[in-house]
Image (cartoon, grey):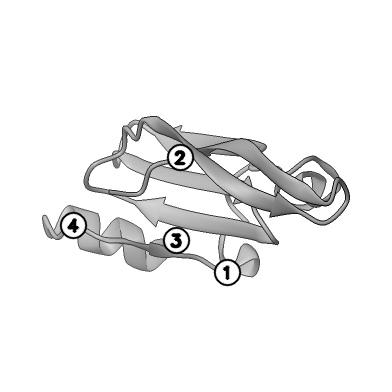
């Protein structure tokens, strides 16, 4: 997260995936998301640096870090559920 802080101080916008071992300073519940249903999420916002770290459970847990646009609406997507053997609707964060 130190690189993200440094880029924010220089006024550069960054958005990208982050490894779970890179958010050790952030109290986000990455390991707990593995056990939750697909579509569950957790996020933390640092108001000082205006950085958002968001993790959600899709096929695996995905973690993104942003210091630019940090408000994302939800959208509904259709995904195949192997457990139910049918397509079902899921809520996910929009990344665009």
Between disc 2 and disc 3, the foreground one is 2
Residue named by callout 2: 93
Residue named by callout 1: 19
Between disc 2 and disc 1, the foreground one is 2
Residue drawn at the location 47% of the way across and 46% of the way down: 53
Question: At which x and y percent is residue 96?
Answer: 27, 48
Between disc 4 and disc 2, the foreground one is 2
Residue named by callout 3: 1
Mark 4 lies on a secondary structure that is: loop
Which comes before the other along the chain, label 1 or label 3? 3
Question: At which x and y percent is residue 7?
Answer: 22, 63
Residue drawn at the location 61% of the way across and 37% of the way down: 90
Which comes before the other along the chain, label 1 or label 4? 4
Camera-nearest residue between 72 and 64: 72
Mark 4–mark 2 Cα distance, whole angstroms, equals: 20 Å
Q: Is residue 15 above or below residue 88?
A: below
Mark 4–mark 3 Cα distance, whole angstroms, equals: 14 Å
Marks 1 and 4: CB-CB under 8 Å?
A: no
Question: At which x and y percent is residue 87?
Answer: 68, 46
Residue named by callout 4: 13
Marks 2 and 1: CB-CB under 8 Å?
A: no
């Amino acid at each position: 997260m130190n690189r993200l802080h440094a880029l924010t101080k220089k006024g550069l916008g960054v958005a990208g995936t982050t490894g779970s071992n890179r958010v050790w300073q952030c109290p986000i519940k990455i390991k707990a998301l593995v056990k939750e249903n697909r579509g569950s999420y957790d996020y933390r916002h640092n108001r000082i640096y205006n950085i958002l770290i968001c993790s959600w459970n899709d096929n695996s847990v995905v973690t993104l870090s942003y210091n630019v646009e940090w408000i994302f609406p939800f959208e509904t997507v259709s995904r195949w559920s192997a457990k139910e053997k049918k397509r079902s609707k899921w809520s996910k964060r929009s990344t665009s």
